[in-house]
Amino acid sequence: MTSIYHSNSSTHEDHRSTEFLLSAHLAFLYRPELVSTLLDTFPSLPQFFAILNGNFKPTLAQEEFIQNLNPRFRKRLQKGHWQGEAQKEIHILKKRGVEAIDITTAEYPPLLKEISHAPLILFSKGSPIHSLPLTVGLIGTRRPSPYGERQAQRFSRELAKMGVTIVSGLARGVDSLGHRAALEVGGQTIAVLGSGLGKIYPHENKRLAQQIQEKKQGALISEFPFDVKPFKHHFPLRNRLISGMSQALLVIEASEKSGTLHTVDWALEQNRPVFVLPGRVEDEEAQGCLHLIQGGAYPVVHPREILDFLSSKVPSKFRTIEERPLSECRPEQNLQDPFLKRLLPLFKQKDLWHPDELSQSLNESPLELLAKINQLENEGYLSRQGGGCYSLGISSVE
């Protein structure tokens, strides 16, 4: 993978070019809407800084771009504020083994180059991110219901087994479930951070972030410098990269005021198809999804529907999917077990059951019931939730 920083044998000119590039990235980090105009207006970033400081005669378009910059912002650029920051960052990148991928290189994700607010540089750690065959952004609430948990795992696992890279934001809830499910089946996943790669957020997902890197099953990426914290205003910026990296977006659960819907807005602006898992009309975490469906998003009940859609829309160079029967993508099921055949219908009535309720409903002694549900939990048919209750596990999903 090509990096913007160079070896010790690099020329002084190379080093200065690197410094200018990273300086511009840091300067325009919170002004991504200006990046494409910047690149279109100036032949090179060194020339941009030369013109900015009066060392080179500008064209009318170049003069107009500079004059339209906020005066305070323009003054900081002229004083070289970000060049000092760039020098510090280059040192950190080398020390931490982080790749910094320039938008003008072939290593930059081609899908992301298409969007109007693409960052000049992506910081990346893990596998290469420029030649992913198919990508689906999987997003949703940080507080999924048992139904949402099962479906996030189901869609992520089956899509990952079919060769799709799962893109998400490493957040609690649906994001984490999607990343983990893809890893479990040997698939690829991309985690897009709202912080620098040195400040993993949330803290409890540090191990998950390490697994993505160590297993070489994807990468962590960010546009923020290595030690930047996860400030609140970073996440709307992060969201445009999740949708921008994806050929389609899948929403599992979202309330009416969910931040998830912000990513949907970006996807629509970027002309990405949006798929939505239908929920029950009385569930709060389904309201955002139901409104999206009313607004024209694609309701989806099976991962194959997403794959079929993408196969007809994306260029042929992306069609490298290993076609496999869906039966091979599901855990082994033992639905002929008499106890399981009696148990599963209960979960159509409600998502969570306490063992005491199950004992009464199934007319089983508490000790015998606990032995059976413990076995079913080990096999993946049941999943233990808060308060000692159980929900269906991934193996129970048809």
Image (cartoon, rainbow, N blue to C red):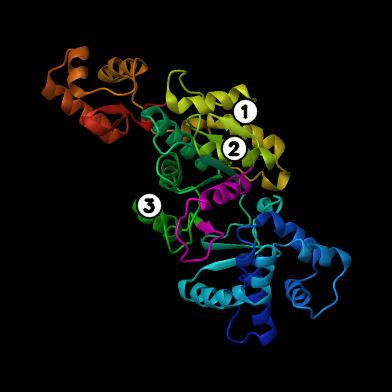
Kind of residue at disc 2: Val
Query: How would you rate the neighbour count of disc 3 (Cα within 10 Å): few for under 14, some for 14-19, many for 20 or more?
Result: some
Residue 205: mark: 3
Residue 120 at what x, y percent from top left?
66, 62
Q: Secondary structure at mark 3?
A: helix
Question: In this picture, is 178 found above or below 122?
Answer: above
Query: How would you rate the neighbour count of disc 2 (Cα within 10 Å): few for under 14, some for 14-19, many for 20 or more?
Result: many
Residue 195 at what x, y percent from top left?
48, 57
Question: Which residue position is annotated with label 1?
Answer: 297
Kind of residue at disc 3: Asn
Instruction: Point out the residue furthest to the front here.
Output: 71
- The residue lying toward the viewer, choosing from 217 and 234, is 234
Residue 282 at what x, y percent from top left?
43, 18
| Residue at mark 1 to residue at mark 3: CA–CA distance | 30 Å
Residue 328 at what x, y percent from top left?
47, 34
Q: Does residue 66 appear to the left or right of 122 in the view shown? A: right
Q: Secondary structure at mark 2?
A: helix
Residue 116: mark: none
**Which residues, given as a range, are shown in magenta?**
220-249
Of tags 2 and 1, which is closer to the observer? 2
Question: In this picture, is 103 found above or below 293?
Answer: below
Quadrant of the image containing the C terminus = top left
Question: Which residue position is annotated with label 2?
Answer: 264
Query: How would you rate the neighbour count of disc 1 (Cα within 10 Å): few for under 14, some for 14-19, many for 20 or more?
Result: many
